Image: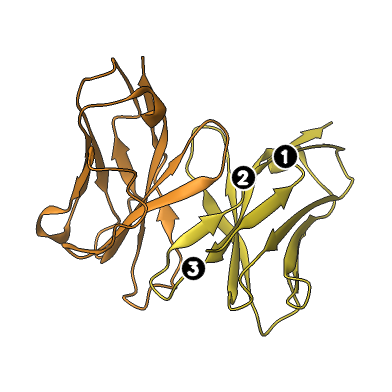
Chain colours: A orange, B yellow
Amino acid sequence: EAGVTQFPSHSVIEKGQTVTLRCDPISGHDNLYWYRRVMGKEIKFLLHFVKESKQDESGMPNNRFLAERTGGTYSTLKVQPAELEDSGVYFCASSQSLAGKSEQFFGPGTRLTVL
Amino acid sequence: GENVEQHPSTLSVQEGDSAVIKCTYSDSASNYFPWYKQELGKGPQLIIDIRSNVGEKKDQRIAVTLNKTAKHFSLHITETQPEDSAVYFCAVYLDSWGKLQFGAGTQVVVTP
């Protein structure tokens, strides 16, 4: 069974540009989470989808970040326009149970560098 | 809100020795505490977890202990091996929907 995949693995962009990150969860997983780790600090929650609906987006830094999950399958996270402080590793995770406490499986992450 | 502190930030051990990583949390209502291991180039992977009705849990060379009164939990790795070298994160579930609060991570290096 394929795990969580993320694309791209690395992205280097200039301040002011737009970047879109993609996450493909494990097939059949209704829960999809986005997290971010900045500069060796803790991994921070960004948002949570249940199928195609946003359950919790309290961790989204500001309105430059837009997440979507079309048809409840893959998800995209767009940053527009990117700022220097957006640099970090963006992780996606998925879990099966709607109860929310089943194991979260993480993707390998997308390392974003904003110059 | 919940605050999770993790120590140490780096840990170097000789192969065969034990490693201990400690985390403290602030919300006494928290009741589920997973530990993740992140190897180079990969995402975090769940290695062990503990619920608040249990004080200790073991899985081969890995164990986790929980002290709810003191609000801290620890990861113990015995007989460390080079493949244990990784970044380890403690975490706390913030709500019933699986939202996780992570510690800052511990870089463990096992030297032969």
Question: Would you name the residue on which mark 3 appears?
Answer: B94
In the rendered structure, the residue with mark 3 lies on which chain?
B
Q: Are marks 1 and 2 on the same chain?
A: yes
Dot 2: element: loop
Question: Would you name the residue on which mark 2 appears?
Answer: B104
- Residue B2, position in %: x, y? 56, 63
Q: Which corner quadrant holds the C terminus of chain B? A: top right
Q: Which amino acid type is marked by label 2?
A: Ala
Q: Which amino acid type is marked by label 3?
A: Leu
Residue lying at 62% horizontally and 45% vertically, measured from the top left: B104
Q: Dots 1 and 2: beta carbons under 8 Å?
A: yes
Residue lying at 58% horizontally and 59% vertically, measured from the top left: B91
- Structural distance between the alpha carbons of marks 1 and 2: 7 Å
Q: Which amino acid type is marked by label 1?
A: Ser
Between residue B8 and residue A108, name the one nearer to us. Answer: B8
- Does residue A30 appear to the left or right of B30 in the view shown? left
- Structural distance between the alpha carbons of marks 2 and 3: 16 Å
Residue lying at 32% horizontally and 50% vertically, measured from the top left: A2
Indicate whether A53 appears above or below B110.
below
Question: Would you name the residue on which mark 1 appears?
Answer: B9
Of pointers 1 and 2, the one earlier in the residue sequence: 1
- Residue A6, position in %: x, y? 31, 39
Would you say residue B59 is visible in this rendering?
no
- Does residue B31 appear to the left or right of A21 in the view shown? right
- Structural distance between the alpha carbons of marks 1 and 3: 23 Å
